[in-house]
Image (spheres, grey):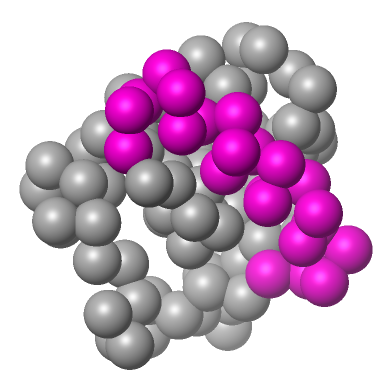
Amino acid sequence: MEQQIVPGISLAPSGQATVDPSLADVLFELALALEEPTQLPVDVQHVVAAIILAARTGELETDASISSDDPSLVALLVGHVKTVFNVYGGKVGRDD
């Protein structure tokens, strides 16, 4: 059974994330917004991984709405995007 991370993003027991297509633009815009503060080549998969990490540490509630024009969300995700690159080398999918 999948666990809801935030509305539109869920995680299967296998670790596979499912993202509702309605979030595609928001996640892309967040990736662009995160490139400058992180100085990293952020893509949508990195944003999803950062959102999952933030939820797992209790920094994002399961009912939190994801918006690309939310400066506090961008600020929150900066550290988690850096973690994705520092700990996982930026590789977040099986295709990487």
Residue 62, given in percent of the width and then of the height, sits at 66, 42
Indicate the quadrant where residue 72 lies.
top right
* Image vertical order of residue 54 relative to residue 21, above or below: above
Residue drawn at 60 percent across, 38 percent down:
32
Q: Which residues are magenta?
A: 19-40
Q: Position of residue 25 (x, y in %)?
A: 81, 54
For residue 15, above or below residue 29: below
Whether residue 65 can be seen here: yes
Near-viewer residue (2 or 8)? 8
Query: Viewer-proximal residue, 46 or 65?
Result: 46
Q: Quadrant of the C terminus?
A: bottom left
Residue 41 vs residue 6, the one in the foreground: 41
In the picture, measured across the screen, residue 48 lies left or right of residue 63, that is left
User: Where does the N terminus fall, quadrant-wise?
Assistant: bottom right
Percent x, y of residue 65: 79, 36
**Above/below status of 18 relative to 63:** below
Q: Position of residue 87 (x, y in %)?
A: 11, 48
Question: Dominant secondary structure of the magenta stretch?
Answer: helix
Q: Residue at point 58% right, 22% down? A: 74
Residue at the (48%, 62%) spot, across then down: 45
